[in-house]
């Protein structure tokens, strides 16, 4: 199902001026040269009834802790063919290649099948004209750049949450997806969970009366001591890993474990992400907005406070409390689980709905037996998040978690982070996407990018 490449060529990012170590250059050249000769033909029996013209050809960018799970999900669809994987860690990209080729061999591709190309630079994968869609599962500071380039190059995009590192990045990503007519889905899989959908439908259809308060709760990350500088592992292209982020000396807890796929340290460092406010917050705040029907806007006031580590490598927020006020008068109280229980609680004048993964409860309990009528608000039905994405790639319909929704759900979290860091109440214009009368806060809507990297 190769849909071709956009007329606009992939931008070069001024790549010729980039300084690359000899080790990184030789590794990339060897990998790229080797993959060009790999056979990519898979017997039709592997894909069942899916004709070659109906297959969705996929490349996976980022095959670490989350990326390997996303890769295996893609392999589970008979109409999807994974032909390329990319990562700045050569061990991880080799493991991913082995997983792909082993899967297709087991499905009948033959014992000699070696049809998965490997890349150390996402731009090389995106430049391939035979790829229809990409799955991007990189660190947060590497979300917007490859997603925007994929859109420009005519690729549809599945992007792990959160949508972006900054609000500016998110807006530019939305604009690119719209401009180039791409199918986009964010990895907010709670939208494909029947319990979350049921809870939001009950709220949207007035079953708990007028909503006045929504409570969102999730855990926090620990800090850590200062870490020693360490030699960069041979398998890691560290300069590429840093990419647009400020230069910093390598230490293992800054990046990801050298062995295995344990939880990486970058999740707790503000140069690469905002911590749990976007890690879990982009899931639960998304549900809060879905239930309110405010998924294409945002709050008008934010008042946050938090504790931050005073030293050490990991510097994202600890215990926190954020109060968002929306134009409809609803208050969203987002706080750690010492204050709010994990999940989302909708409180209305006539009852409440509480939903978390695997659980839903209502007050009164009889609300769970309610049927949403044909003339009421019925929310988008998706029972398989990745399946929904690939169905929409074929149909060109909008996914259950499209770009604007992804951006707005991420923006709520980033607004909270800015308020927590400044330690004061902020007013926000969700139409203009700027703070009202606060130049200091507005400067925090974007971050400078290192070297030649730019949006």
Image (cartoon, rainbow, N blue to C red):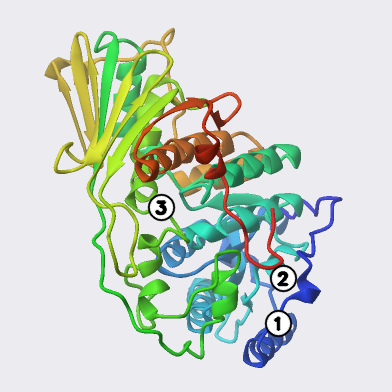
The residue lying at 47 percent from left, 28 percent from top is 380
Which residue: 65% across, 73% down?
A: 121
Distance, label 2 to label 3, CA atoms, is: 29 Å
Residue labelled with disc 3: 274
Crowding at mark 1 (Cα within 10 Å: few <14, some 14-19, many 20+): some
* Pointer 1 with pointer 3, Cβ within 8 A: no
Q: Earlier in the sequence, mark 1 or mark 3?
A: 1
Mark whose residue sits in front, 1 or 3: 3
Q: Is residue 183 visible?
A: no
Residue 155 in the image, given as x and y percentages of width and height: 70, 52
Q: Position of residue 264 (x, y in %)?
A: 36, 69
Residue on which disc 1 sits: 32
Q: Secondary structure at mark 3?
A: loop
User: Which residue bears the numbered disc 2?
Assistant: 124
Above or below residue 407? Residue 44 is: below
Q: Are marks 2 and 3 in contact (CB under 8 Å)?
A: no
User: Could you say which is closer to the camera, residue 50 or residue 253?
Assistant: 253
């Amino acid at each position: 199902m190769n849909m071709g490449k956009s007329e606009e060529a992939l931008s070069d990012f001024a790549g010729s001026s980039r300084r690359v170590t000899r080790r990184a250059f030789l590794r990339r050249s060897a990998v790229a040269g080797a993959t060009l000769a790999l056979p990519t033909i898979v017997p039709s029996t592997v894909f069942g009834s899916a004709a070659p013209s109906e297959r969705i050809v996929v490349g996976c960018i980022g095959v670490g802790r989350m990326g390997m799970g996303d890769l295996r999900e893609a392999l589970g669809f008979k109409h999807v063919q994974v032909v390329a994987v990319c990562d700045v860690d050569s061990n991880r990209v080799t493991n991913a290649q082995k997983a792909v080729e082993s899967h297709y061999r087991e499905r009948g591709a033959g014992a000699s099948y070696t049809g998965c190309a490997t890349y150390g630079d996402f731009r090389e994968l995106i430049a391939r004209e035979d790829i229809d869609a990409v799955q991007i599962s990189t660190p947060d500071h590497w979300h917007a750049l490859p997603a925007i380039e994929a859109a420009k190059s005519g690729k549809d995009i599945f992007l792990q949450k959160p949508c972006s590192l900054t609000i500016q990045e998110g807006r530019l990503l939305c604009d690119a997806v719209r401009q180039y007519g791409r199918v986009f889905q964010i990895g907010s899989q709670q939208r494909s969970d029947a319990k979350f959908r049921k809870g939001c439908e009950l709220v949207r259809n007035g079953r708990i009366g007028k909503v006045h308060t929504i409570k969102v709760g999730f855990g926090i990350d620990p800090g850590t001591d200062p870490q020693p500088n360490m030699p960069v592992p041979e398998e890691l292209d560290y300069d590429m890993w840093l990419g647009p982020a400020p230069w910093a000396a390598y230490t293992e807890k800054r990046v990801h474990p050298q062995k295995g796929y344990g939880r990486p340290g970058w999740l707790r460092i503000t140069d690469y992400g905002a911590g749990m406010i976007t890690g879990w917050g982009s899931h639960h705040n998304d549900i809060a907005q879905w239930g309110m029907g405010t998924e294409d806007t945002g709050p008008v006031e934010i008042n946050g406070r938090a504790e931050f580590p005073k030293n050490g490598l990991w510097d994202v927020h600890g215990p926190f409390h954020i109060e968002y006020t929306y134009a409809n008068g609803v208050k969203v109280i987002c706080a750690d689980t010492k204050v709010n229980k994990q999940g989302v609680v909708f409180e209305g004048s006539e009852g409440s709905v509480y939903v978390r993964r695997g659980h839903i409860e209502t007050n009164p309990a009889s609300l769970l037996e309610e049927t949403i009528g044909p003339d009421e608000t019925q929310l988008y039905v998706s029972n398989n998040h990745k399946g929904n994405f690939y169905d929409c790639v074929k149909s060109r319909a909008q996914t259950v978690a499209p770009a604007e929704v992804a951006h707005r759900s991420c923006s709520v979290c980033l607004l909270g982070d800015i308020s927590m860091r400044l330690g004061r109440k902020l007013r926000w214009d969700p139409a203009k996407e700027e703070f009202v009368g606060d130049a200091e806060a507005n400067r925090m809507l974007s971050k400078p990018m290192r070297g030649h990297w730019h949006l």
